[in-house]
Image (cartoon, grey):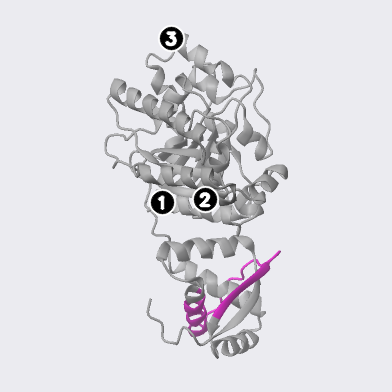
Amino acid sequence: MTVPYSPDDREKVVAKLPVALRQELKVRAAEFGVDIKDAVTEGVQAWRTDASERALVDTTGGTSFATYLPAGLYGEFKEDCKQRGIPFNQGIAQSIRLWLDTHPSPRRPARRTGARRIIFGNQKGGVGKTATSSGVAQALAEAGNRVLLIDFDPQGHLTKQLGYDLFDIDEPSLAKYMLGEAKDELRSLLVPIEEGVFGGRLFMLPACKDAFLLDAKLATSRFVRVKETALEKALEPLEQKFDYIVVDCPPSLGYSMDTALYYCRTREGEEPGTSGIFIPVLAEDSSADAYDMLYDQIQDLSADMDVEISMLGFIVNMYDSRKGYIATSSLNSWKEIGDPPVAGVMPELKEQREAVRVKQPLLSYAPDCEQSEVMRTVARRITS
């Protein structure tokens, strides 16, 4: 990017900004491939040349935000703020807001086929399906998308980790809608993830306590003639309301997983890779064995139903190079597969466990941690 000043002649600027504004700036700058300091500089310069009265930005609860402005601009900008009768923090916030408003997200628009469908699955439990599906859904919502996150695992870890209760056995649930045992609209079961950084764009469909019976009931159900279509038929009424539907799948190879795999297939009119499956794994051998079984299931279903299912990538979770040869060689083995690629490597750090303990979304609890950045990296791979 060409700028009318020396990139080396800058001075540090520190302000107090709300987390939501900082994260929106970070994501948008990444989408446009510019440095945050250049985006802020453009915003400040545009704000200075536009003397019209601007709406106040809510800076309540702001935390420290540091960047670098060209030498001399900082002092001039502070004087402008003084003359307009607003605090410096408000001036920076308005400048960033101005840059964001004049640089709308270049993300793909929703397709005529409805929401893009992203599932996270692996036959092995404990590989991070819940953490990665939740984190990537948060990153997609943070970037301005309307996202529905579905807890499709009978264990309900996703629901519990975000601080919600599972539906009771006698209550309506996704499983009951799949089996034709529920009335009214499925949308009534959605709960909003009430965090400012997501701006009312992230919703969750909680798990239910009787979901462990779904496989057996699907096998004998007369309501769904083609059992693989059960999840799609249940979710179809919601698809036009969201840009992305993200599914945390059960650690099994049963009928439930078949319905999820069929749901993320490439539909007529979609480009391959628009929807599909991410496969969370660990840097150790048992994950490779589990992936082999999942791969066979995907190939069998693709052949039986004559569909294409895109494997979008591996996410290597809880990676720690200090574990030595087993971890590093296993990571290299995942990378050597090539197709699907390794979409992200998630370090084994405390922030994710802390977020679970306090029942908060990772990207609002620790927005600047390395794990959050990996979630955003995977989200950008989806939207690019």
Residue under the point 41% across and 82% down? 3
Which residue does the numbered mark 3 point to in the structure image? 222
Q: Nearer the viewer, residue 259 or 80?
A: 259
Q: How many marks?
A: 3
Q: Is residue 64 magenta?
A: yes
Where 78 sits versus 383, above or below?
Answer: below
Q: Earlier in the sequence, mark 3 or mark 2?
A: 3
Where 153 sits versus 195, above or below?
Answer: above
Left or right: 276 as drawn, with respect to 159: left
**Residue 374 percent across, percent down from the top left:** 52, 53
Which residue does the numbered mark 2 point to in the structure image? 375
Q: Amino acid at mark 2?
A: Met
Which residue does the numbered mark 1 point to in the structure image? 381
Is residue 281 visible in this depiction of the protein? yes
Which region shows up in magenta?
40-68
Q: CA distance from mark 3 to mark 2?
A: 40 Å
Q: Amino acid at mark 1?
A: Arg
Q: Nearer the viewer, residue 271 or 157?
A: 157
Q: Earlier in the sequence, mark 1 or mark 2?
A: 2
For the N terminus, which image quadrant?
bottom left
Label 2: few (<14), some or many (≥20) within 10 Å? many
Residue under the point 44% across and 13% down? 223
**Residue 368 percent across, percent down from the top left:** 60, 60
